[in-house]
Image (cartoon, grey):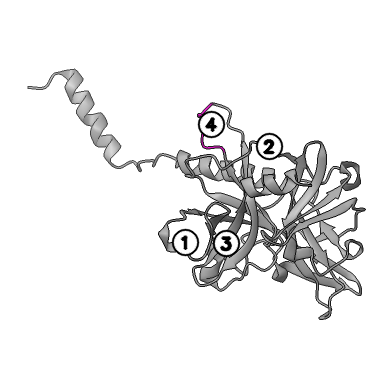
């Protein structure tokens, strides 16, 4: 025999059967997306495109650089092969557009909202430093000459890869096929964000790379036939894995190194490690 209380509970349960059940919001996924956008925005401030239109083909050559502060001096660090064929006077730079940056998936869809077109500009350079052996170059400049369009990441003498490397790596580059000819002598570019997993440097890679000098990063756009032309010289970044969770999350970027080469058969990018970048800058 059921009392009044139990019968009311039965009626309530029956009435609930026909109501649609609301699925819980995918909070974790939303948080990950929001965190990715914050990291993307932070990386953009330390990134610039590098180009020269004075080429034999007439088409602009494109590459990327990372804004680095080293012992009070400001540099755009890039891969040496990006700038080796051009004098400083022929180089132009693509800085972060003003305002909030709309994300654009370069390789995924022809209908994706494109990234904003950004014109290339010239800036005065103090001096160029290069190292052919590890394919690095540093362009020294005065911070005032970039008019707030770059923020220089303060690289420490003890900077190194922080273990464990469990986070996805992020880079922003200026791919060659993201440029657009606006008219005679006028070219604009669309930078794009690249996300890829860290590839452990096991015995498989010993004959191809020196793991003391290089890291490897997946290049997911290769699955859609894309090539990484223009990502050479891009800084590679990840969120500090030692940071504990807090109510207010902010990205704490760690500089991993500079993209220098692409292993096409394996579809991975080769990165000159931050420790080697430090050694390069220390010798300037």
Alpha carbon distance from label 4 to label 2? 21 Å
Q: Which residue is drawn at 40% across and 39% down?
A: 24
Position above or below: 24 against 180: above
Query: Residue 283: x and y, percent?
Result: 75, 46
- Magenta span includes 245: yes
Alpha carbon distance from label 2 to label 3? 25 Å
Query: Residue 284: x and y, percent?
Result: 79, 47
Query: Main SS type for the magenta part?
Result: loop
Q: Is mark 3 on a helix, strand or loop?
A: strand
Q: Which residue is drawn at 28% across and 35% down?
A: 15
Instruction: Please tell me how many numbered marks the rendered image carries.
Output: 4
Range shown magenta: 240-246
Q: Which of marks 4 and 1 is nearer the N terminus?
A: 1
The residue identified by callout 2 is 157
Q: Earlier in the sequence, mark 4 or mark 2?
A: 2
Which numbered tag is attached to residue 243? 4
Q: Which of marks 2 and 1 is nearer the N terminus?
A: 2
Q: What element carries label 4?
A: loop
The residue identified by callout 1 is 206
């Amino acid at each position: 025999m059921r009392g009044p209380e139990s019968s009311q509970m039965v009626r309530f349960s029956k009435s609930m059967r026909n109501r649609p059940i609301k699925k819980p919001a995918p909070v974790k996924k939303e948080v990950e997306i929001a965190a990715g956008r914050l990291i993307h925005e932070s990386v953009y401030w330390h990134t610039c495109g590098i180009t020269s239109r004075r080429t034999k083909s007439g088409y602009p050559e494109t590459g990327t650089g990372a804004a680095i502060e080293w012992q009070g001096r400001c540099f755009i660090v890039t891969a040496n092969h990006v700038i080796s064929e051009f004098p400083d006077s022929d180089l132009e730079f693509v800085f972060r557009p003003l305002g909030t940056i709309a994300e654009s998936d370069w390789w995924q869809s022809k209908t994706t909202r494109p990234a904003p077109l950004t014109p290339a500009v010239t800036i005065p350079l103090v001096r160029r430093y290069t190292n052919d052996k590890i394919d690095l170059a540093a362009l020294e400049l005065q911070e005032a000459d970039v008019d707030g369009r770059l923020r220089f990441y303060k690289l420490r003498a003890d900077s190194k890869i922080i273990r464990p490397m469990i986070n996805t790596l992020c880079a922003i580059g200026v791919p060659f096929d993201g440029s657009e000819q606006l008219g005679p002598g006028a070219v604009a570019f669309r930078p794009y964000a690249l996300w890829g997993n860290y590839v452990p440097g096991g015995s498989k890679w010993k004959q191809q790379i020196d793991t003391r000098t290089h890291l490897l990063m997946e290049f997911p756009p290769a699955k859609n036939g894309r090539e990484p032309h223009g990502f050479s010289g891009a800084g590679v970044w990840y969120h500090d894995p030692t940071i504990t969770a807090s109510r207010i999350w902010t990205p704490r970027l760690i500089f991993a190194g500079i993209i220098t080469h692409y292993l096409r058969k394996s579809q991975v990018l080769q990165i000159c490690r931050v420790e080697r970048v430090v050694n390069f800058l220390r010798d300037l």
